[in-house]
Image (cartoon, rainbow, N blue to C red):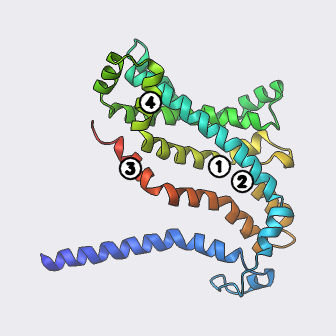
């Protein structure tokens, strides 16, 4: 029995190590490759760079126009993220804590939005955007990100609000608090970890989006960082495949890695808080 337990423990650690290696190695290889000279790519792919070639990042940022793409991604990501979180939290609060006749029906409508594939709405949205002048407009991307981010956000926030005791809200009402004070000063601080978790999920969705950005943006000066990568490998990468291209990819993934590493503990707390019955 003891030997079986030891074997199981060792096997579990080996399995975790292998999975960690499979997950981390591509990222490490990508970052190391971004510092290689173009001539080094004739060496085996596992070979380390001969030195730190920062010129790859300079070329990616300037010649590859990654600076503009990075700025465009920031411009559409953070307004979208803020509005998704505020609208989602307010709607979920109204559905879960403000009892009215159609709250369950409205929730089902939003849940239906989760099941709509993005590809189905591309043509109708393209037609609408063409008629309203929202093509090649970053505002159009913000609108579509909000629309597709809200259903999942509302669903998750509704689960988190279920763990919030109704007695707190009733006590606040008896003390004279209005609905806005209850929402901003009581409910939001109590589910702040959930805010972080949902914000990170939606950040990945918006920052890594390719299909909407490719469909609605054709102007090279308005492209986001993901569509910029396609442009980079198509035009710049053909002339100098290697370091600058990998440097541009690293620039695209570094923000997501940094955010996750910083907010990891809060994300774990937020993911488990909605699963605990209050």
Q: Is residue 237 above or below residue 140?
A: below
- Mark 4 or mark 2, which is nearer to you? 4
State the separation of the CA atoms marked 3 and 2: 30 Å
**Contact, CB < 8 Å: mark 1 with mark 2?**
yes
Answer yes or no: is residue 242 visible: no
Left/right of residue 78 with respect to residue 137 in the rendered view = left
Residue where numbered disc 4 is placed: 185
Instruction: Tell me, for residue 207, which label it has, or none.
Output: 1
**Furthest-front residue in this view:** 175
- Mark 4 or mark 3, which is nearer to you? 4
Residue where numbered disc 3 is placed: 269
Q: Is residue 124 above or below residue 268?
A: above
**Lower sequence index among marks 4 and 3:** 4
Which residue does the image show at 26% across and 74% down from the upper left? 9
Which residue does the image show at 19% across and 74% down from the upper left? 5
Residue where numbered disc 2 is placed: 226
**Lower sequence index among marks 1 and 2:** 1
**Lower sequence index among marks 3 and 2:** 2
Q: Is residue 263 above or below residue 155?
A: below
**Lower sequence index among marks 3 and 1:** 1
């Amino acid at each position: 029995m003891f030997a079986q337990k030891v074997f199981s423990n060792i096997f579990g650690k080996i399995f975790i190590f292998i999975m960690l290696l499979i997950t981390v190695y591509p990222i490490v290889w990508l970052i190391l490759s971004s510092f290689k000279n173009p001539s080094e790519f004739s060496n085996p792919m596992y070979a380390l760079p001969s030195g730190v070639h920062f010129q790859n990042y300079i070329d990616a940022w300037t010649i590859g126009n990654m600076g503009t793409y990075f700025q465009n991604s920031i411009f559409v990501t953070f307004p979208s993220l803020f509005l998704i979180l505020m609208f989602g939290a307010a709607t979920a609060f109204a559905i879960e804590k403000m009892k009215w006749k159609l709250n369950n029906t409205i929730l089902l409508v939003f849940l239906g939005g989760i099941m709509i594939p993005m590809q189905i709405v591309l043509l109708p949205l393209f037609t609408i955007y063409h008629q309203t002048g929202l093509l090649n407009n970053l505002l159009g991307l913000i609108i579509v990100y909000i629309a597709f981010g809200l259903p999942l956000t509302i669903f998750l926030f509704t689960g988190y609000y279920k763990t919030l005791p109704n007695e707190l809200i009733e006590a606040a009402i008896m003390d004279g608090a209005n609905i806005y004070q209850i929402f901003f000063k009581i409910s939001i601080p109590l589910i702040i970890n959930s805010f972080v978790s949902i914000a990170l999920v939606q950040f990945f969705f918006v920052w890594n989006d390719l299909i909407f950005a490719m469909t609605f943006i054709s102007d090279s000066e308005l492209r986001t960082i993901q569509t910029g990568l396609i442009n980079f490998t198509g035009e710049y990468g053909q002339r100098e495949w290697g370091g600058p291209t990998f440097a541009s990819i690293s620039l695209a993934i570094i923000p997501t890695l940094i955010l996750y590493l910083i907010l990891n503990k809060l994300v774990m707390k937020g993911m488990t808080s909605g699963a605990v019955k209050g």
